[in-house]
């Protein structure tokens, strides 16, 4: 059998061990376990504890489960934004977040920045006096860019009264994020956790929890005050994705600590950028090394070449991710996620060396 590897950045490659976890979930009765039983609440408690230790999330932060990252966008508008949010974006996901926020809180605003640009924090048009939430996308999956730790730290230092919310959907679980430097972080499990979709993880600082209690949203089934009080007993106000939580617990138990994971992904990304900067038919989409993503590698070329590359790659069992939105035909995206094995990247480099020798 020809090995098959997918580099699609979401839904992305799942760990091969997921096959066994699914069988175990069935055999051990997780699929019909009542969600208020001791069996499930201990699982939730253990999973939250493992998320904190394995990912270096501060002990005084709160972890909640949602259905997706998109749901988190709405929860934040509903429950943490009585007035307006301010959004900084350079791609489709960040822009969509602004759109969802505006639909619920029309006074929300945002500005776009260039993919090769590190935004000037002093010049950002928001005031901590009348802004509830400043929203950024740590890793913009659509443009293969990221905002680095130093940037987030400086932004955190100029918030005034606002809270900082970070969409880390395609990096949380892969990178060693500095949770202490923002109030809200969220992701869904089909990216860096190497799991099937259907579960979101929402992480709140003590400041964000206090703000949620103050705003006291009671108008939605997924309002934060209700979610927070249920989570005190490791429960949810609706029947949660117990299978998803079970799979997450298994993945976390089998994983190396996030620091080692981060280093591995950073080394792999560097090798790939170096390789594609040499004479290959594709070039890195992002020219500024400062803004290039670690977990999603964007490559550009002309549409005909890209089509040929994708077709030939598929013939040898390599599924490259398409570009996103307006970049669909002129870029490919390579997920550098933890569940994509080193062997896949070796096969990818060999494919280019053989089919497109410089
Ligand atoms: C994938 C992705 C989302 C959406 O995730 P869902 O689980 O489909 O809601 C949001 N933001 C970013 C940055 C993403 O990569």
Image (cartoon, rainbow, N blue to C red):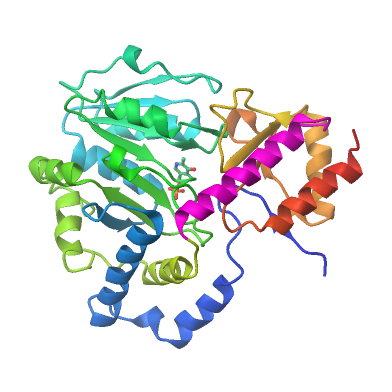
Percent of width and height locating residue 353: 87, 43
> Could you tell whether 291 is left or right of 119 in the image?
right
Question: For residue 78: magenta?
Answer: no
Name the image quarter holding residue 164: top left
Q: Nearer the viewer, residue 249 or 157?
A: 157
> Could you tell whether 41 is left or right of 325 in the image?
left
Q: Is residue 113 above or below residue 74?
A: above
Residue occupying image coordinates x 36% and y 71%? 242
Name the image quarter holding residue 334: top right
Residue occupying image coordinates x 36% and y 81%? 32
Query: What is the magenta segment's predominant secondary structure?
Result: helix
Residue occupying image coordinates x 61% and y 69%? 16
Q: Is residue 335 visible?
A: no
Percent of width and height locating residue 54: 40, 60
- The residue segment tinted magenta is 257-282
> Which quarter of the rendered picture does the N terminus lie within?
bottom right
Percent of width and height locating residue 18: 55, 71
């Amino acid at each position: 059998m020809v090995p098959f590897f997918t580099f699609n950045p979401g839904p992305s490659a799942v760990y091969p061990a997921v096959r066994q976890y699914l069988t175990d979930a069935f055999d051990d009765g997780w699929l019909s376990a009542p969600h208020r039983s001791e069996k499930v609440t201990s699982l939730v408690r253990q999973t939250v504890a493992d998320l904190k230790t394995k990912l270096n999330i501060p002990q005084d932060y709160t972890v909640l489960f949602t259905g997706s990252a998109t749901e988190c966008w709405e929860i934040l508008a509903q429950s943490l934004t009585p007035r307006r949010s301010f959004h900084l974006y350079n791609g489709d996901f960040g822009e969509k977040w602004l759109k969802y926020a505006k639909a619920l809180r029309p006074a929300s605003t945002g500005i776009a920045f260039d993919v090769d640009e590190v935004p000037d924090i002093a010049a950002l048009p928001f005031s901590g006096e009348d802004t509830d939430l400043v929203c950024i996308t740590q890793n913009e999956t659509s443009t293969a860019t990221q905002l680095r730790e130093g940037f987030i730290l400086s932004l955190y230092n100029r918030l005034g009264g606002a809270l900082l919310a970070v969409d880390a959907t395609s990096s949380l679980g892969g990178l060693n994020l500095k949770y202490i430097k923002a109030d809200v972080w969220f992701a869904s499990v089909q990216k860096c956790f190497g799991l099937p979709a259907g579960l979101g993880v929402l992480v709140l600082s003590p400041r964000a929890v206090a703000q949620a209690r103050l705003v006291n949203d009671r108008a939605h089934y997924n309002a934060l005050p209700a979610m927070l009080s249920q989570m005190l007993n490791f429960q949810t106000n609706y029947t949660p994705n117990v299978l998803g939580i079970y799979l997450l617990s298994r993945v976390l138990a089998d994983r190396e600590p996030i620091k080692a994971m981060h280093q591995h992904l950073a080394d792999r990304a560097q090798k790939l950028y170096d390789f594609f900067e040499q004479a290959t038919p594709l070039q890195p989409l992002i020219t500024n090394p400062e803004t290039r993503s670690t977990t999603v590698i964007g490559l550009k070329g002309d549409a005909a070449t890209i089509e040929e590359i994708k077709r030939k790659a598929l013939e040898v069992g390599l599924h490259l991710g398409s570009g996103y939105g307006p970049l669909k035909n002129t870029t490919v995206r390579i997920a550098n996620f933890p569940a994509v094995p080193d062997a896949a990247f070796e096969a990818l480099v060999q494919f280019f060396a053989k089919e497109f020798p410089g």
